[in-house]
Image (cartoon, grey):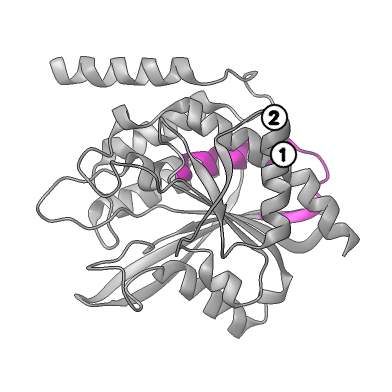
Amino acid sequence: MAATLVVAALALRSLGEGVSAQSGGSAFDSTRAWEHLRQQVAIGPRPSGSAGNVKNRDYIKAQMAALGIKVVEQPFEGQTPLGPVKMVNLIATIPGKRPDRIILASHFDTKLFREVRFVGASDGASSTAALIELGRVLKTRQQLPFTYELLFFDGEEAVVEWTGTDNTYGSRHYVDHARKTGTLQSIRALILLDMIGDRDLTIRRESHSTRWLTDIVWATASKLGHRQFMDEETTVEDDHIPFVKAGVAALDIIDLDYPQWHTPQDTLDAVSARSLQVVGDVVVASLPLIEQRLLKN
């Protein structure tokens, strides 16, 4: 009972830090996003190939179905240092006037730890929660100029250690498949969200990311007064790298300045609905500007 009261108190505290949006409106609603985050954490650890990962996948699919967004599974087998692991990307599509796609992405798996219980509140429940809410926002828009794809990657985390190919299994498989099927060229831009729940949110420009995409998003954040988007640079290997290497314009929005990263302390009390709201507001406000840029080219 005491543990239940603590979780409830944390949820209320974080919800209070969010920015309220009109129910059912077109603004990003951190209250909704926080609930998606909480539900994922309640599942427990969610590493690739685990029962928790399957439950999380089912949760995402249920949320997409409730929004009327079609989801396709992309199953594959990740060749890991511990042997083959069955993994599944989820591809949710919101049709637009053009078949050319803008992708919003997140990974939904958590790092495999056998010695501790790791529930990944920020890494990666936060970004997955935001992506689900962004799907709701996009469904409220009329006449989308581009088709939008919500891409939920499995297997971002290293199974043992982030070296060589022990990482980004889902994004590498997606890009390889798109290249083989001739659909890569229809991807006009990718925005990757990862670890965006930190209470002390600090997002730096990622050096591998495409400059014009970064400039649009950072200028939007500045206009909105969100100083959490800082002009300092950092370099991060993440699910955007396979897209960058394939020549796709891509941006990684990530806060790696997070003391709880890959520790048992990456729990509800380390994350905030307010941080989800900041990132959600910036992405929603940036998308029309990104669309305008792409329509000119």
Name which quarter of the figure residue 137 lies in. Answer: top right
Residue assigned mark 1: 220
Q: CA distance from mark 1 to mark 2?
A: 6 Å
At 36% across and 77% down in the image, what residue appears? 165
How many dots with numbers?
2
Prevailing secondary structure of the magenta residues: helix
Is residue 287 in view from this perspective?
Answer: yes
Can you name the residue that lies furthest to the right here? Answer: 296
| Residue kind at label 1, given as amino acid type | Thr
Closer to us: 57 or 110: 110
Can you name the residue that lies furthest to the bottom here? Answer: 180
Closer to us: 270 or 256: 256
At 45% across and 45% down in the image, what residue appears? 255
Please provide percent x and percent y for residue 44. 24, 42
Closer to us: 233 or 265: 233
In the image, residue 280 above or below residue 124: above
Can you name the residue that lies furthest to the left here? Answer: 115
Name which quarter of the figure residue 211 lies in. Answer: bottom right
- How dense is the environment of label 1, judged by Cα within 10 Å: few (below 14), some, or many (20 and up)? many
Residue assigned mark 2: 224
Please provide percent x and percent y for residue 130. 52, 39
Q: Are marks 1 and 2 in contact (CB under 8 Å)?
A: yes
Please provide percent x and percent y for residue 39. 35, 34
Left or right position of 193 against 271: right
Q: Which residues are magenta?
A: 127-148
Name which quarter of the figure residue 7 lies in. Answer: top left
At numbered mark 2, what does the secondary structure look like: helix, strand or loop? Answer: helix
